[in-house]
Image (cartoon, grey):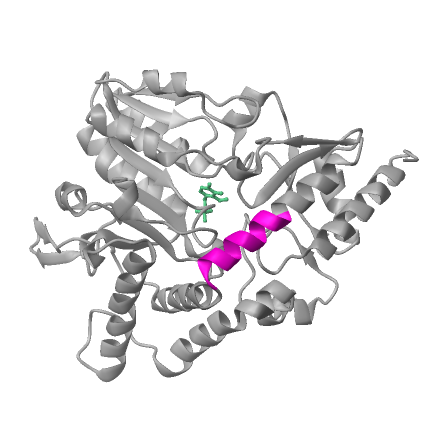
Amino acid sequence: MNEDVLEGTYKSYFPVFEAHPDLIYLDHAATSQKPLSVIEAIKDQMTFENGSPNRGAHKLSVKATEIYDNGRRKVIDFIGGMDPREIVFTKNATESLNLIAYSYGMNFLKHEDEIAILISSHHSNIVPWQMVAQKTGAKLVYLMVDSEGKMPASELDKINERTKIVTFPWISNGIGTRIEPKRLIEKAHEMGAVAIIDAAQVAGHERIDIAELDADFLVFSGHKMFGPQGIGVLYGKYELLEKMPPFLTGGDMIEYVTCFETTYEEVPKRFEAGTQNVSGVKGLVAAIDFIEAIGMHSIQNHERKLTQYIVEQLKKLPFITIYGAETLADRGGLVVFNVTGVHPHDVASILDDYGIAIRAGHHCTQPLMQHLELTATCRASYSLYNSEQDVDRLIKALFKVRKVFGYDD
Ligand SMILES: Cc1ncc(COP(=O)(O)O)c(C=O)c1O
């Protein structure tokens, strides 16, 4: 598979490009396209292996339980951990972050405690903490970034003995800049705070080694790493999960229920109320298999080359403003830019006429946009199904966008 990827025939793994041969998909950061192996795995599960997990004694139920439990093992291996009990399956990164906020934040934070949030966070890592602050009286403290999306070292001074939570995106979906997670985690731990990594834009792009990172919580969504929508991951250190009360309650997460009282299941089942998304887990496992068959290193190399190429090409256009880090090593697999004289929404809709899918708007990072004094931007995000030819087509189409608005470049 390795050579196919490097030779650029990788698109053939993704049936969407058979259905839409002219599609240039540059919206990977919003949701990835799915390889055939993931689609087939889900189809097989639904066709041959469908049963309710954790409930029955019959074969299909046992099979569903097996798929689910093996999925936990697969995910903990994928992120370099040891204990599958530290993996909770959720709907997506958003639900994982809400779980931490509601179960940990609401119960262990109090008046005057501080929650340090990197300003480049996605709304899903801001709004839940606003709720915690409103309820507990804890204070939100923002760690700021510079115009390139990098956090100056001086911001670490805002983390102090009152800080109980430090939360940040490893790579920001709003500006594409990578943060060095270790220094934030170490500072959080020095001050006795819990460190949370939002790895939604990292999972499936580069290796995650949770043992090395030593983060307390880490979240990501399956659908941004070639898996299906509706399955997300929360990694939490066992000793933290163990002391947290349930988030959602009902079936499956209980040990014993009387009319007025309930005892709860062990971790992680305590956090997985109701019938779980077995086909989602099956698809996520297939996505991890796909990534491992290609090799994380190859994916990363491919994305790095594309980042270099797209930045170089966009920089040649005098009517483009690029945001994000100057150094390529500080960038993730997305480029944020604006076209002079054209609103990002117009750019996106005209590009769509040329078969090019990008994202325009605030990218669910409004506090970052306010900080950078921007209202909206265009975002091109990519993965191994993109090529330099895709970038060339984007560049050509950007001239056409300008032409529609009367510019003759
Ligand atoms: C950095 C980051 N965090 C969290 C999310 C939320 O992901 P989901 O909508 O899958 O919950 C996104 C989605 O774009 C993201 O880019």
Residue 372 falls in which quadrant of the image? top right
> Looking at the image, is 99 positioned above or below residue 130?
below
**Residue range highlighted in magenta:** 295-306
The C terminus lies in quadrant: top right
Q: Residue at x 48, y 36 (%)?
A: 178
Total labels: the figure holds 0
Where does the image place residue 81, in percent across and percent down from the top left?
25, 53
Question: In screen coordinates, is 119 left or right of 377?
Answer: left
Residue in view at x 49 percent, y 27 percent = 150
Name the side, left or right, on which 142 lies relative to 173: left
**Residue 193 in sight from this viewpoint:** no
Q: Where is 116 relative to 258, above or below? A: above
- Residue in the foreground of this view, choosing between 349 and 151: 151
- 407 in relation to 261, above or below: above
Magenta region includes residue 303: yes
**In front here: 380 or 332?**
332
| Horizontal side, residue 399 vs residue 46: left or right | right
* Residue 243 on image: x %, y %: 13, 41
Residue shown at the point (21%, 18%) measured from the top left: 161
The answer to whether any part of residue 375 appears in the image is yes
Q: Is residue 43 magenta?
A: no
The image position of residue 184, as x and y in percent, is 33, 29
User: Does 356 sit above or below residue 97?
Assistant: below
> Residue at left 75%, top 63%?
22
Q: Main secondary structure of the magenta part?
A: helix
Whole-percent x, y for residue 154 in the image: 39, 16
